[in-house]
Image: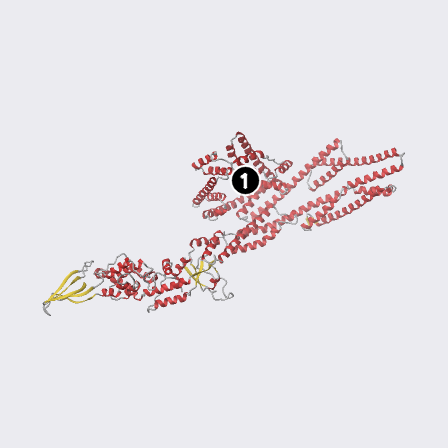
Amino acid sequence: MKPLTQAIEAIRAALKEEVPPSAVEDAAIIYAQFCSDVERRLDLVAAMLQKGSDYQALQVAEEDPPLLDLAAAVSFGEEKNWQIYCEARGLKVAARVDLRIIQDLESLYSRGISANHPLYKDFRAAVLSRDDARSLRIVKTILKLNPQDDNARKELQRLENKALQEKIDLLREALKTDDEEHIATLTEDIKAAAPPSKLERLDVYEQGESIRQALRRRQAEARVPDMLSTMQRLKAEGRWQQVGQMLSVVNAMFKEHGFTPADAVQKATLVDLTQFHQKERAADEKQRNFDRTLKSFLSFVEEVETRLLTGAGVTFEEIAGKDESFIKRWKELEGYQLPVAADSLQRLRTAGQELRHKLERMQRTKRVGNIALAAAALVLLCGVSAISLHAWKAWTLTQELASYQAKENYSAAENLIKKLRGEEELLLRWPYLQARIEEVSAWAAKSRVTGKQAAEALLALENSFQGEQSKLTATQLVRQLSDAEALVKQLGGDVAAEPKNRLAVLKTKADLHLATVLKKFVASTSTTLAKLEKRSTAELSHEKLAANVSTSCTAIDKELLPLEALLKPEVPALAFPADLETRIRALRQRLTTYQDDLRTFAAIRKETAGAASLDDYRKAITKWQTVKFAEAAPSLKMLDTLPTEKAFQAALFTGGDKDLLQAVLDDKSRYYMAPDTLLEAELKMILSLLHNEYLNNIFESSVIHYSSKKSGGTIWSMGKPEATIIGGSSRWSAKFYEPDPTQTSVMFIQHSFTRAGEVGEYQGDAIATTRLSQTSEFMNSLDIGRISDEKGEHVLKPLLEVCDKLVLDTRGSPIAKAYVLLKLEDMMHLRPREWGLVHCPSLQQDLQVLHRTLGTTPLRSEDWLVPEMQEKWLAPLTAFFKPLKSRAYLREALAHRNYLRAATSAGLKFAGYVETDLSLVLNSQGRSAGELWMISRENGKPLLVPNPAAGKAASDAPKVIVASASVPLSPVFFVTADRRALLQQYQQALSSTGVDLKPLPAESLFLTNP
């Protein structure tokens, strides 16, 4: 219905005489077509209502566009005036809307519908057939008839959302292709189906809209050359109306797509075509007005000729009035300075002459009649008195003077008065004649002064013109014209003819002058406005920084204000054309929109800067989602990834280990890094180590074989071999294991070694030396039995202390040490917080290295006795344990826990946030903090940024602190504890054993930063 809306706007303007006739003709045709359509559909509705077919009537009424909406649009309130206007000018007259049928249709809508109405049946059928378009149309009709139907309203929303989602899905698929036209069409459908607020966060729509804008702009740019060629051809054919229509389309394309003529040739062509259209439109309008005036004049002449021909009932006053009207119309016609057809001109002149002759004859007849009447009275009254005759003559002259005054013919009145005063002094003695003479003399003198003033005013105006240009300003020219017109209007009769003619000529010149001034004014304003529009298109964008847009808004606003002041000129003739005024207002609206967006963004930024806690910051950053500037885009990602205060503490203090942080907060490891009691599983592990027969009480013995007189090597026994002497023989009995390179298992078998004979003549085998193995000594040194009390209820010693002894031991087999360390690991993993494993990063790292060394091979407690295992693992495990002699696990865990306690007790304080330009916005506490922590861009971990403003006066502190490696909109924190002091205490605690232990890289950013 856009053409109808535009036509009605043109009609309203035409009724106010604000549009050219050519635009009115098009508007009349369009309006009449829509009215005919309304009339046709109303007739159908009326016929159906008469038959009782209400449902069919509703179907006709609900066709697109809906009948009631269309009828309301064509009923714009001035239909009667428009009909008179069209009839008077020969334009197409529109059909009148039958209000009775409209009322019947509205009554049908107001009655509502029941649940068993056919519409519901049709709706269900459309839903079952999956005809969404028909379902949507029917449910809209149902809601019009029954607005209280909540189910219908929900179905309407569902169908609209479904249709929108289908279009979005189609667009998403189309974006995967190169069919830009299909993408543009789908995007336009989506834009028409959903409000802008719903589309703002649809990435697929934004992609489609950017492609659509680029495509439509390219298409528009490609159309311009052809359109210019077509307009030049139309210009050559003199078809200026079509040129004007195409110029409107081209200018609309420039404005909509934000581009300008491609080169100087196109620009010059557009200027030439615009000037041609304006000139021809002005000439056409002038010709139309001239034709209308001439037609009216000829109608008037025809009426005059008829009256003069019949002559019946023609009075002197009627002829005088028509004579005056004839003069006015003649002067108006002369003002156009256009040729009149010879026959029409001859007819006008003849009618004017006849009218003038008739008027003069009637004046003479009237005077003669008056005199004859006076003479008759004199004859009749001659016998009565000569005085009566004298009085009658005086009365007649009084009436004649009154007649001259009424007709504003002061020249004739002055001549008569002069004659009376010179020749009829006796008559002047009559009081009423004398009074009338004084009154008429005063009036004539005043009229002559007014005439002189009018002549001087007109002469001054005429002298102000040089050709068609005036030296006066527009305001002065209009004011002086108004004053001169007021003086001329006071004149009457014949004396007014010349001033009126001169005034008409001056008005024409003034109109031409003001038109020229307006043209120059419009050209200069258009140039300035075009620059501002181009600048606004280039600089006002939500994709640019808000600060830059704000600067541009201020500059554009400063230049736009003078243009807006010109929208209300003192001289109405200098009012800008509607299109230029619309452009100025559109630019102001665009500027206001961006200024409002900037104010909203500034308010949100102010609220964000005023956040006192992380929760306040989260609420503030949520509002950034409503900001249209692309500068606020990081807020979406930040809102999704914004850590809690506890998560940031874990990342800062414990390398992201939330369990470790929670262990510190819960303080489960107690003072000595051990729980109070043992779990059953832990007790079983301790007992398994205490009673492991392959690790404990294993003795190492050397055997001598006397038969070969050679040493038999080393054998292992469970327990010390029992030595007995029977007579001259010695026996050593125990469960022995003799290493066999071909076997991977260990079996201790009961066996005895017997030696017989005297010294020097021994026979058999004998145990030369025996001692507790170093591995068993190592196990004894661990004192595993002292981990808990005798009943296994209370813990007496931390496992980290056992680990310290284990890595410091140099006697035990590395394979056995590795096995025991893995068992201790299993035990600590049951409760890593209570046993302090979470507080010992170096032990965690060492265990990881051990697992990598062993790979997937599980160690057995007896592997340290197996030759094959010794050959495989002895060297790598020796290398593994060698650097661990510097470890102090328990001391490290205590120092780590104490450091974390101190850091977490100090707490994390909110200090501000990182702006989108990576500058820091800090609160009062943040400005005084020496070290600031925020989220790093590289890995998302806490980033340390020293505060150069801390401890300095405001005058000495830097104005801006930039964190170039941080994430935009990251929250900023600070820790109230002295980090360097904590680090020093931690390092001292680690180094108190005499070994310089460094914090591990992943241990704590709070510790490892320089």
Judging depth in this view, the residue of 73 and 247 nearest the camera is: 73
Residue 134 higher or lower than 702, as above or below: above
What colour-coding does the image apply?
secondary structure
Q: Which residue is mark 1?
A: 1
Query: Which of 338 and 822 lies nearest the eye of the viewer?
Result: 822
Residue furthest to the top in view is: 51
Total of numbered circles in the picture? 1
Label 1 secondary element: loop
Determine whether, in the image, residue 577 is placed left or right of residue 189: right
Residue 614: name its quadrant. Answer: bottom left
Residue 607 picture location, percent across and down: 50, 56
Picture coordinates of residue 648 (x, y %)? 41, 58
Question: Callout 1: 10 Å neighbours few (<14), some, many (20+)?
Answer: few
Residue 564, image x, y percentages: 60, 51
- What is the x, y in percent for residue 384? 89, 35
The amino acid at mark 1 is: Met
Q: Can see residue 281?
A: yes
- Identify the image quadrant of the N terminus: top right
Picture quarter containing residue 242? top right
- Residue 240 seen by the camera: no
Relative side of 994 to 642, left or right: left
Q: Nearer the viewer, residue 304 or 832?
A: 832
Q: Quick one: quadrant of the C terminus?
A: bottom left
The answer to which quarter of the image holds residue 12 is top right
